[in-house]
Image (spheres, rainbow, N blue to C red):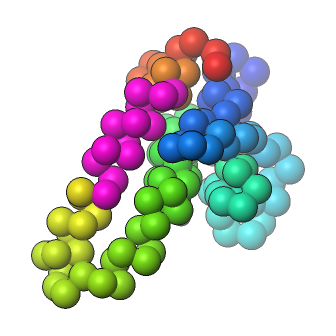
């Protein structure tokens, strides 16, 4: 990211957890074939600093969804879905309130996603 680019917030509140959000300048993620990574046990999200701004925003949301998936136990629930339609409905039902909470609890993230600004958290 260039010097005049506003960095994402340094943490995300996901349910009861506070994830540290790190913008990594080492390029290790890119060498490993990733744009970002979520370490749920460490409550840490790492994203590649070299990503273009819109891709960086997408990646932060992608990684936040991994954190939400962990928080709501999505992996465990999906295995119980009797059909693809049920699976689709379960995903929507589980993620909708968690996404609302993510946006409500992270005004800095919302500002950064929408216009690259927002209150620092
Ligand atoms: Zn992923």
Residue found 45% across the figure and 37% down from its top: 102
Magenta residue check for 102: yes
Residue 13 screen position, x and y as percent: 57, 36
Residue 56 shows up from this direction: no
Q: Quadrant of residue 72?
A: bottom left
As for residue 112 lying within the magenta part, the answer is: no
Figure check: 31 above or below 95: below
Boundaries of the magenta span? 94-106
- Is residue 14 found left or right of 10 in the rendered image? left
* Left-right relation of 10 to 65: right
Q: 35 above or below 54? A: below
Seen in the picture, residue 23 relative to 8 is either above or below; the reply is below
Residue lying at the far left in this picture: please name it. 85
> Residue 52: x, y in percent?
58, 40
Picture residue at 34% right of the left edge, 77% below the top: 78
**In this view, which residue lies farthest toward the right?**
26
Q: Residue at x 19, y 87 (%)?
A: 82
């Amino acid at each position: 990211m260039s010097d005049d680019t506003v960095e994402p917030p340094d943490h995300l509140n996901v349910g009861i957890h506070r994830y540290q959000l790190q913008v990594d300048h080492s390029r290790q993620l890119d060498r490993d074939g990733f744009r970002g990574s979520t370490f749920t046990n460490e409550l840490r999200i790492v994203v590649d600093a070299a990503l273009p701004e819109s891709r960086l925003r997408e990646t932060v949301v992608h990684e936040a969804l991994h954190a939400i998936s962990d928080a709501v136990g999505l992996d465990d629930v999906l295995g119980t879905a009797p059909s693809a339609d049920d699976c689709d409905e379960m995903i929507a039902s589980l993620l909708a309130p968690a996404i609302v909470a993510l946006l409500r609890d992270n005004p800095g993230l919302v500002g950064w996603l929408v216009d690259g600004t927002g209150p620092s958290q």
